[in-house]
Amino acid sequence: MSTPDAAPEGQGNEPQSPQAGEPERSGAAPVQSAADLLALGDEALLEALQRQTFGFFWEGAHEASGLARDRHPYTAARTELVATGGSGFGLMAMLVAVERGWVSRSAALERLNRATPLLARARTHHGALPHFLDGRSGETIPFMPRDDGGDLVETAFLCMGLLCVRQYFNGMDLAEVRLRECIEALYERVEWDWYGQGGSQVLYWHWSPTCGWSLDHRIRGWNECLVTYVLAAGSKRHAIDPELYHHGFASGPEFRNGGHYYGIELPLGPSYGGPLFFAHYSFCGLDPRGLSDRYADYWRQNVNHVRINQQHCIANPHGFAGYGADCWGLTASDDPGGYEAHSPTVDNGTLTPTAALSSFAYAPAECLRTLRHFLANEGDALWRRFGFVDAFSPARRWYADSFLAIDQGPIVVMVENYRTGLLWRLFMSAPEVQRGLALLGFRSSSPADTL
């Protein structure tokens, strides 16, 4: 990645032509500059942050299917590529857009009734979709060698979004009824139990029609995958035995912690908490407020993880320029060397806006100050067409030229969960989710359990 060589759209006197791989903004709201946003009050600022970021999923979607591209800009070789998990976050963001009046219910329904038929005819691998698929044909696009089949975790993120859509579009007109029926079929076809590989007492992330289980990637230890086990337990046709959660996920390496970092206790996870997407991806739908099991209180887990991540950037043990109380956030993203899962233990000076901005529910005052700091200090080098670019390095004065679905989506969704709890309320109201949580031994006193 390199520093962009042109001013972002909306900054000069004339509108700029889209970069290769970027869509036209026909009919879209004008792009606001960083200076425009700084002049707004707090609520209007959050609205603008969400709305411009949502453009990634609305204007930037795959033209035929309406599903989410993995990234923008994209190469000619990836014109038809869509991302399964990123599309799940995009579906959730679309509900925010409808609720807030950025797009009409009918326009969203039309988009959904293009996306779900593609998903229904897509090639599956024991019911699971691949990480990437072709947005026209539904054929699998290999993610990497030996990863050319089912990706259970990305499928779970997609199902999380689909179940939220089903709960939201609850009308009795034929289009909404058919949409709900299609979503239920998509979820129930996933052979969650088969991904337990015949009694191994853990779920496996990948299966390949050419290489079988050769990746041998077990879904265990504290990470972003909790929702996979909840959805697997909640299935009517392919439910897993709860012992896969307890003997697999919850007994894996780096699951229990209990140590203190910067004076803050961390119940679960690796040293210093790992990348912040652990506190975001599953919790776009799972409401951590009042959620607990025999292992942890998940609100406390996530709040403390965020606090440790910020405190690491304040302590700044490596002396990177720019780090501080209002400039922090380590998670997986593009960086000057390619792509890295940044964390306090893997810190090369690259900050990722989604790390802090998807943490609003956990640390609202700190995240708001950071949002304003990003806009004031980095301006339109960091804030562009689809919101904040994926990452930047204050020390190197480097800015990514990319936007990623799995980073943009949680910003829209988690800010909305902070503001209204919309996605938490929808997902937690799904009977499959409640069944899965109960079978795994979770307790929830969340206000989002019912609509």
Image (spheres, rainbow, N blue to C red):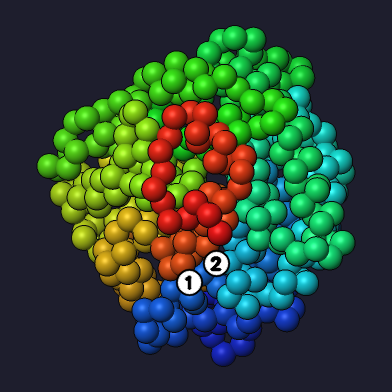
Rendering coords of residue 339 (x, y %): 48, 42
Tag 1: Cα neighbours inside 10 Å, few (<14), some, or many (≥20)?
many
Nearer to me, 303 or 211: 303
Residue at 15% from the left image edge and 49% from the top image edge: 315
Residue carrying label 2: 53
Q: Is residue 212 left or right of residue 257?
A: right
Question: Looking at the rendering, which quadrant does residue 279 occupy?
Answer: top left
Left or right of 227 in this view: 77:
right
- Label 2 secondary element: helix
Residue occupying the point 64% across, 63% down: 94
User: How many C-alpha atoms fall within 10 Å of the one at disc 2: few (<14), some, or many (≥20)?
Assistant: many
* Residue 181 in picture, x, y percent from top left: 80, 48
Q: Contact, CB < 8 Å: mark 1 with mark 2?
A: yes
Q: Is residue 32 above or below residue 23?
A: below
Between 118 and 12, the residue placed more toward the observer is 118
In the foreground, 363 or 437? 437
Q: Element under label 1?
A: helix
Q: Is residue 317 left or right of residue 44?
A: left
Q: Is residue 401 visible?
A: no
The span from disc 1 to disc 2 (Cα, nearest Å) is: 6 Å
Q: Is residue 237 above or below residue 8?
A: above
**Residue that mark 1 sits on:** 49
Amino acid type at circle 2 is: Thr
| Kind of residue sitting beneath label 1 | Leu
Residue at screen point 59% across, 61% down: 93
Position in image of residue 389 (x %, y %): 49, 61
Would you identify the image quadrant in which residue 325 lies? bottom left
Residue 188 makes an appearance in the image: yes
Measured as percent of width and height from the top left, residue 271 is found at 26, 31
